[in-house]
Image (cartoon, rainbow, N blue to C red):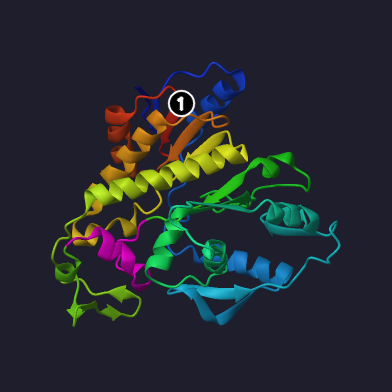
Amino acid sequence: MMETKTPPYAAFGEPPTDPKLKQCLKALTELPPMDKMTMSGPCVKQTNKMESFMKKSFGFKNTREYFVDGVMAFTIKDFQKTDPNKTVKISEKGKSFKMTIGEILEWQKSFRCYYDSSIYTGSDAKALISRSLSGGSKGGLEAWKMKFAIRISLNPIFMNFDGKILDRNPKDPLENNIYLVSVCGHDFAGRKHDISDITLYIKNWSEVYVTKKGELVAKGRDFIPKGVAGDLNIELLEKDLRRMAILRLRAQDKTGIQIVGETGIGLGVFSGDYIGIGKTVRSVAAATLAKVLSEEKFENIKAVICALPIFKAKDNYVYFKEAFEKYYKGTMPVYIMDQDM
Protein backbone atom coordinates (compact mmCIF):
# COMPACT_ATOMS: atom_id res chain seq x y z
CA MET A 1 0.00 0.00 0.00
CA MET A 2 1.25 3.49 -0.85
CA GLU A 3 0.05 6.97 0.05
CA THR A 4 0.51 10.55 -1.04
CA LYS A 5 -0.37 13.69 0.87
CA THR A 6 -1.82 16.33 -1.52
CA PRO A 7 -4.41 15.29 -2.45
CA PRO A 8 -4.16 11.99 -0.58
CA TYR A 9 -4.85 8.61 -2.10
CA ALA A 10 -4.24 5.04 -1.04
CA ALA A 11 -3.50 2.31 -3.60
CA PHE A 12 -4.16 -1.39 -3.03
CA GLY A 13 -3.62 -4.51 -5.13
CA GLU A 14 -0.87 -5.20 -7.62
CA PRO A 15 0.57 -2.43 -9.82
CA PRO A 16 -1.04 -2.52 -13.28
CA THR A 17 0.97 -3.94 -16.18
CA ASP A 18 -1.38 -2.79 -18.95
CA PRO A 19 0.09 0.47 -20.34
CA LYS A 20 -3.30 2.18 -20.81
CA LEU A 21 -4.50 1.26 -17.33
CA LYS A 22 -1.19 2.36 -15.86
CA GLN A 23 -1.46 5.70 -17.65
CA CYS A 24 -5.08 6.15 -16.55
CA LEU A 25 -4.35 5.50 -12.87
CA LYS A 26 -1.28 7.74 -12.97
CA ALA A 27 -3.39 10.56 -14.43
CA LEU A 28 -5.96 10.14 -11.65
CA THR A 29 -3.33 10.39 -8.93
CA GLU A 30 -1.97 13.57 -10.51
CA LEU A 31 -5.31 15.40 -10.56
CA PRO A 32 -5.28 18.75 -8.75
CA PRO A 33 -7.18 18.99 -5.45
CA MET A 34 -10.92 19.17 -6.00
CA ASP A 35 -12.91 22.32 -5.30
CA LYS A 36 -14.78 21.37 -2.12
CA MET A 37 -16.56 24.66 -1.57
CA THR A 38 -18.57 25.58 -4.68
CA MET A 39 -21.12 22.77 -4.44
CA SER A 40 -20.90 21.90 -0.74
CA GLY A 41 -24.36 23.08 0.16
CA PRO A 42 -27.75 23.76 -1.44
CA CYS A 43 -26.10 24.42 -4.87
CA VAL A 44 -28.83 26.95 -5.65
CA LYS A 45 -26.96 28.57 -8.54
CA GLN A 46 -26.17 25.25 -10.22
CA THR A 47 -29.68 23.89 -9.61
CA ASN A 48 -31.29 27.00 -11.10
CA LYS A 49 -28.99 26.82 -14.11
CA MET A 50 -29.90 23.20 -14.75
CA GLU A 51 -33.62 23.90 -14.34
CA SER A 52 -33.36 26.83 -16.76
CA PHE A 53 -31.59 24.61 -19.31
CA MET A 54 -34.17 21.83 -18.90
CA LYS A 55 -37.09 24.26 -19.23
CA LYS A 56 -35.69 25.90 -22.34
CA SER A 57 -34.56 22.72 -24.08
CA PHE A 58 -37.08 20.10 -22.96
CA GLY A 59 -40.08 21.85 -21.45
CA PHE A 60 -39.20 20.76 -17.92
CA LYS A 61 -41.99 21.48 -15.45
CA ASN A 62 -42.45 20.59 -11.79
CA THR A 63 -45.82 19.13 -10.96
CA ARG A 64 -47.58 19.43 -7.63
CA GLU A 65 -46.89 15.78 -6.92
CA TYR A 66 -43.92 13.89 -5.51
CA PHE A 67 -42.12 10.77 -6.72
CA VAL A 68 -41.43 9.98 -3.05
CA ASP A 69 -41.47 12.16 0.07
CA GLY A 70 -39.12 15.09 -0.50
CA VAL A 71 -38.55 14.40 -4.22
CA MET A 72 -40.73 16.57 -6.45
CA ALA A 73 -42.15 15.03 -9.60
CA PHE A 74 -41.65 16.66 -12.98
CA THR A 75 -42.52 16.27 -16.63
CA ILE A 76 -40.63 16.98 -19.87
CA LYS A 77 -41.91 17.16 -23.43
CA ASP A 78 -41.67 14.17 -25.74
CA PHE A 79 -38.83 14.84 -28.17
CA GLN A 80 -38.79 11.44 -29.88
CA LYS A 81 -39.88 13.03 -33.17
CA THR A 82 -37.52 16.01 -32.94
CA ASP A 83 -34.84 16.31 -35.62
CA PRO A 84 -32.04 14.06 -34.28
CA ASN A 85 -29.43 16.49 -35.65
CA LYS A 86 -30.77 19.41 -33.62
CA THR A 87 -28.18 20.63 -31.12
CA VAL A 88 -28.95 21.75 -27.57
CA LYS A 89 -26.40 23.24 -25.21
CA ILE A 90 -25.83 24.41 -21.67
CA SER A 91 -23.40 27.33 -21.53
CA GLU A 92 -21.58 29.58 -19.08
CA LYS A 93 -18.62 31.95 -19.27
CA GLY A 94 -17.66 31.07 -22.84
CA LYS A 95 -17.90 27.30 -22.38
CA SER A 96 -20.66 25.13 -23.79
CA PHE A 97 -21.61 21.51 -23.43
CA LYS A 98 -23.29 20.68 -26.74
CA MET A 99 -25.18 17.53 -27.69
CA THR A 100 -27.60 16.45 -30.37
CA ILE A 101 -31.08 15.08 -29.83
CA GLY A 102 -29.90 11.91 -31.55
CA GLU A 103 -27.13 11.46 -28.98
CA ILE A 104 -29.56 11.95 -26.12
CA LEU A 105 -31.87 9.31 -27.56
CA GLU A 106 -28.95 6.89 -27.86
CA TRP A 107 -27.99 7.54 -24.24
CA GLN A 108 -31.58 6.83 -23.21
CA LYS A 109 -31.62 3.57 -25.19
CA SER A 110 -28.57 2.37 -23.27
CA PHE A 111 -30.58 2.19 -20.03
CA ARG A 112 -30.60 -1.21 -18.33
CA CYS A 113 -31.86 -2.39 -14.98
CA TYR A 114 -30.32 -5.42 -13.29
CA TYR A 115 -32.10 -6.88 -10.29
CA ASP A 116 -31.68 -9.61 -7.69
CA SER A 117 -34.14 -12.36 -8.65
CA SER A 118 -34.15 -13.68 -5.08
CA ILE A 119 -35.59 -10.33 -3.94
CA TYR A 120 -37.91 -9.62 -6.86
CA THR A 121 -39.80 -12.87 -7.14
CA GLY A 122 -43.01 -14.07 -8.74
CA SER A 123 -44.83 -13.22 -11.94
CA ASP A 124 -45.22 -9.54 -11.05
CA ALA A 125 -41.52 -8.92 -10.37
CA LYS A 126 -40.88 -6.91 -13.53
CA ALA A 127 -44.13 -4.97 -13.13
CA LEU A 128 -43.05 -3.97 -9.62
CA ILE A 129 -39.62 -2.86 -10.86
CA SER A 130 -41.23 -0.91 -13.70
CA ARG A 131 -43.52 0.92 -11.28
CA SER A 132 -40.62 1.74 -8.97
CA LEU A 133 -38.50 3.00 -11.87
CA SER A 134 -41.39 5.24 -12.87
CA GLY A 135 -41.34 6.93 -9.46
CA GLY A 136 -44.25 4.98 -8.07
CA SER A 137 -42.56 2.84 -5.43
CA LYS A 138 -44.53 2.52 -2.23
CA GLY A 139 -42.87 3.05 1.13
CA GLY A 140 -41.73 0.09 3.21
CA LEU A 141 -40.65 -3.22 1.70
CA GLU A 142 -41.23 -2.04 -1.85
CA ALA A 143 -38.81 0.85 -1.35
CA TRP A 144 -36.37 -1.47 0.48
CA LYS A 145 -36.25 -3.82 -2.51
CA MET A 146 -34.84 -1.05 -4.71
CA LYS A 147 -31.47 -1.60 -3.01
CA PHE A 148 -31.32 -4.74 -5.13
CA ALA A 149 -32.06 -3.05 -8.47
CA ILE A 150 -29.14 -1.46 -10.34
CA ARG A 151 -29.77 1.09 -13.08
CA ILE A 152 -27.05 1.72 -15.67
CA SER A 153 -26.96 4.04 -18.67
CA LEU A 154 -24.60 6.19 -20.69
CA ASN A 155 -24.67 9.56 -19.04
CA PRO A 156 -23.11 12.92 -19.93
CA ILE A 157 -21.18 14.95 -17.36
CA PHE A 158 -21.89 18.67 -17.75
CA MET A 159 -19.67 19.86 -14.92
CA ASN A 160 -17.37 18.73 -12.14
CA PHE A 161 -17.75 19.53 -8.44
CA ASP A 162 -16.42 23.03 -9.13
CA GLY A 163 -19.68 23.88 -10.87
CA LYS A 164 -17.96 24.91 -14.12
CA ILE A 165 -19.46 23.85 -17.45
CA LEU A 166 -17.25 21.47 -19.44
CA ASP A 167 -16.59 22.24 -23.11
CA ARG A 168 -17.97 19.55 -25.39
CA ASN A 169 -18.92 19.27 -29.07
CA PRO A 170 -21.43 16.76 -30.50
CA LYS A 171 -20.03 13.31 -31.29
CA ASP A 172 -17.23 13.63 -28.73
CA PRO A 173 -16.53 9.92 -28.04
CA LEU A 174 -15.65 10.51 -24.37
CA GLU A 175 -19.29 11.00 -23.39
CA ASN A 176 -20.17 7.73 -25.08
CA ASN A 177 -17.89 5.91 -22.69
CA ILE A 178 -19.11 7.24 -19.32
CA TYR A 179 -21.87 5.38 -17.48
CA LEU A 180 -24.05 6.41 -14.58
CA VAL A 181 -24.67 3.55 -12.15
CA SER A 182 -27.65 4.48 -10.01
CA VAL A 183 -28.12 2.56 -6.78
CA CYS A 184 -30.06 2.97 -3.55
CA GLY A 185 -28.25 2.79 -0.22
CA HIS A 186 -29.54 2.20 3.28
CA ASP A 187 -31.50 5.05 4.83
CA PHE A 188 -30.97 5.44 8.56
CA ALA A 189 -32.02 9.09 8.54
CA GLY A 190 -35.52 8.07 9.63
CA ARG A 191 -37.37 8.85 6.40
CA LYS A 192 -40.98 7.65 6.42
CA HIS A 193 -40.67 6.21 2.90
CA ASP A 194 -37.83 3.93 4.06
CA ILE A 195 -39.52 2.59 7.17
CA SER A 196 -38.29 -0.95 6.44
CA ASP A 197 -34.68 0.18 6.82
CA ILE A 198 -35.53 1.12 10.38
CA THR A 199 -37.61 -1.93 11.32
CA LEU A 200 -35.32 -4.47 9.61
CA TYR A 201 -31.90 -3.25 10.72
CA ILE A 202 -32.54 -1.42 14.02
CA LYS A 203 -33.32 -4.07 16.61
CA ASN A 204 -34.68 -1.62 19.18
CA TRP A 205 -36.46 0.71 16.76
CA SER A 206 -39.48 1.02 19.05
CA GLU A 207 -37.19 2.47 21.73
CA VAL A 208 -35.27 4.74 19.33
CA TYR A 209 -38.32 6.44 17.80
CA VAL A 210 -41.64 7.72 19.04
CA THR A 211 -44.41 5.15 18.55
CA LYS A 212 -48.15 5.07 19.03
CA LYS A 213 -49.94 1.76 19.42
CA GLY A 214 -46.85 -0.02 18.14
CA GLU A 215 -46.55 2.13 15.01
CA LEU A 216 -43.82 4.64 14.23
CA VAL A 217 -44.94 8.26 14.41
CA ALA A 218 -43.73 10.67 11.73
CA LYS A 219 -43.48 14.44 11.65
CA GLY A 220 -43.58 15.38 8.00
CA ARG A 221 -41.32 12.98 6.10
CA ASP A 222 -39.28 11.85 9.14
CA PHE A 223 -39.80 9.65 12.17
CA ILE A 224 -39.23 11.27 15.57
CA PRO A 225 -36.11 10.13 17.49
CA LYS A 226 -36.19 9.92 21.29
CA GLY A 227 -32.45 10.23 21.90
CA VAL A 228 -31.89 6.49 22.42
CA ALA A 229 -28.97 4.87 20.58
CA GLY A 230 -29.88 2.28 17.96
CA ASP A 231 -28.93 -1.38 18.29
CA LEU A 232 -27.83 -2.25 14.75
CA ASN A 233 -28.34 -5.71 13.30
CA ILE A 234 -24.80 -5.88 11.94
CA GLU A 235 -25.06 -9.42 10.60
CA LEU A 236 -28.11 -8.65 8.46
CA LEU A 237 -26.69 -5.31 7.30
CA GLU A 238 -23.44 -6.93 6.21
CA LYS A 239 -25.31 -9.72 4.43
CA ASP A 240 -27.39 -7.25 2.42
CA LEU A 241 -24.49 -4.89 1.73
CA ARG A 242 -22.63 -7.86 0.31
CA ARG A 243 -25.49 -8.80 -2.01
CA MET A 244 -25.80 -5.18 -3.12
CA ALA A 245 -22.08 -4.88 -3.86
CA ILE A 246 -21.95 -8.13 -5.81
CA LEU A 247 -25.00 -7.15 -7.85
CA ARG A 248 -23.74 -3.71 -8.86
CA LEU A 249 -20.23 -4.95 -9.65
CA ARG A 250 -21.47 -7.87 -11.75
CA ALA A 251 -23.92 -5.58 -13.54
CA GLN A 252 -21.10 -3.19 -14.43
CA ASP A 253 -18.87 -6.04 -15.52
CA LYS A 254 -21.61 -7.38 -17.79
CA THR A 255 -22.11 -3.91 -19.24
CA GLY A 256 -18.44 -3.79 -20.18
CA ILE A 257 -17.35 -1.09 -17.73
CA GLN A 258 -13.60 -1.22 -17.09
CA ILE A 259 -13.02 1.49 -14.44
CA VAL A 260 -15.57 1.43 -11.63
CA GLY A 261 -16.24 4.47 -9.45
CA GLU A 262 -17.53 3.87 -5.91
CA THR A 263 -18.80 6.87 -3.94
CA GLY A 264 -19.93 5.63 -0.53
CA ILE A 265 -23.67 5.79 -1.21
CA GLY A 266 -25.65 6.02 2.04
CA LEU A 267 -22.62 6.84 4.19
CA GLY A 268 -23.34 10.52 4.73
CA VAL A 269 -26.51 11.83 6.35
CA PHE A 270 -28.16 8.43 5.81
CA SER A 271 -25.61 6.48 7.88
CA GLY A 272 -27.44 7.11 11.15
CA ASP A 273 -25.05 9.33 13.10
CA TYR A 274 -27.91 10.93 14.99
CA ILE A 275 -28.99 7.55 16.43
CA GLY A 276 -25.43 6.49 17.20
CA ILE A 277 -24.81 3.91 14.46
CA GLY A 278 -23.04 5.97 11.77
CA LYS A 279 -19.49 4.84 12.55
CA THR A 280 -20.49 1.19 12.56
CA VAL A 281 -22.44 1.51 9.31
CA ARG A 282 -19.43 3.11 7.58
CA SER A 283 -17.03 0.48 8.89
CA VAL A 284 -19.26 -2.41 7.85
CA ALA A 285 -19.88 -0.94 4.38
CA ALA A 286 -16.17 -0.38 3.73
CA ALA A 287 -15.14 -3.82 5.04
CA THR A 288 -17.85 -5.53 2.99
CA LEU A 289 -16.68 -3.90 -0.25
CA ALA A 290 -13.07 -4.87 0.49
CA LYS A 291 -14.06 -8.49 1.08
CA VAL A 292 -16.25 -8.68 -2.04
CA LEU A 293 -13.52 -7.22 -4.25
CA SER A 294 -11.08 -9.74 -2.77
CA GLU A 295 -13.30 -12.64 -3.79
CA GLU A 296 -15.03 -11.67 -7.04
CA LYS A 297 -13.46 -12.22 -10.47
CA PHE A 298 -14.34 -9.97 -13.41
CA GLU A 299 -14.09 -10.18 -17.17
CA ASN A 300 -14.09 -6.45 -17.92
CA ILE A 301 -13.47 -4.50 -14.72
CA LYS A 302 -9.79 -3.59 -14.48
CA ALA A 303 -9.74 -1.21 -11.50
CA VAL A 304 -11.97 0.32 -8.85
CA ILE A 305 -11.73 3.94 -7.72
CA CYS A 306 -13.36 4.91 -4.43
CA ALA A 307 -13.97 8.65 -4.79
CA LEU A 308 -14.33 9.79 -1.18
CA PRO A 309 -13.68 13.51 -0.66
CA ILE A 310 -12.39 14.44 2.79
CA PHE A 311 -14.54 17.12 4.40
CA LYS A 312 -13.83 16.41 8.07
CA ALA A 313 -11.27 14.76 10.35
CA LYS A 314 -12.48 11.16 10.08
CA ASP A 315 -14.46 11.01 6.88
CA ASN A 316 -15.39 8.04 4.69
CA TYR A 317 -11.90 8.12 3.16
CA VAL A 318 -10.42 7.02 6.50
CA TYR A 319 -12.97 4.25 7.07
CA PHE A 320 -12.32 2.79 3.60
CA LYS A 321 -8.54 3.12 3.86
CA GLU A 322 -8.54 1.30 7.21
CA ALA A 323 -10.92 -1.40 5.94
CA PHE A 324 -8.90 -2.11 2.79
CA GLU A 325 -5.66 -2.24 4.78
CA LYS A 326 -7.23 -4.94 6.92
CA TYR A 327 -9.48 -6.90 4.55
CA TYR A 328 -8.42 -6.45 0.92
CA LYS A 329 -6.56 -9.53 -0.35
CA GLY A 330 -7.15 -9.07 -4.08
CA THR A 331 -4.75 -8.23 -6.90
CA MET A 332 -6.90 -5.80 -8.92
CA PRO A 333 -5.90 -2.15 -8.38
CA VAL A 334 -8.21 -0.33 -5.96
CA TYR A 335 -7.58 3.36 -5.32
CA ILE A 336 -9.16 5.34 -2.50
CA MET A 337 -9.00 9.01 -3.41
CA ASP A 338 -9.76 12.41 -1.96
CA GLN A 339 -11.55 13.43 -5.16
CA ASP A 340 -15.07 13.78 -6.51
CA MET A 341 -16.52 11.11 -8.76
Position of 147 with respect to 200 (left or right) is right
Magenta-colored stretch includes residue 214 = no
Position of 336 with respect to 77 (left or right) is left
The residue lying furthest to the front in this view is 123
Instruction: Indicate whether 223 appears above or below 109.
Output: below
Residue annotated with mark 1: 333
Instruction: Indicate whether 181 appears above or below 214.
Output: above
Under circle 1, the secondary element is loop
Q: Residue at x 34, y 28 (%)?
A: 328
The amino acid beneath tag 1 is: Pro
Q: Is residue 136 visible?
A: yes
Q: Which residues are magenta?
A: 186-203
Q: Residue at x 61, y 22 (%)?
A: 20
Where is residue 28? Give x, y as percent.
Answer: 52, 31
Q: Residue at x 40, y 46 (%)?
A: 243
Q: Is residue 279 visible?
A: no
Where is residue 58? Give x, y as percent.
Answer: 71, 69
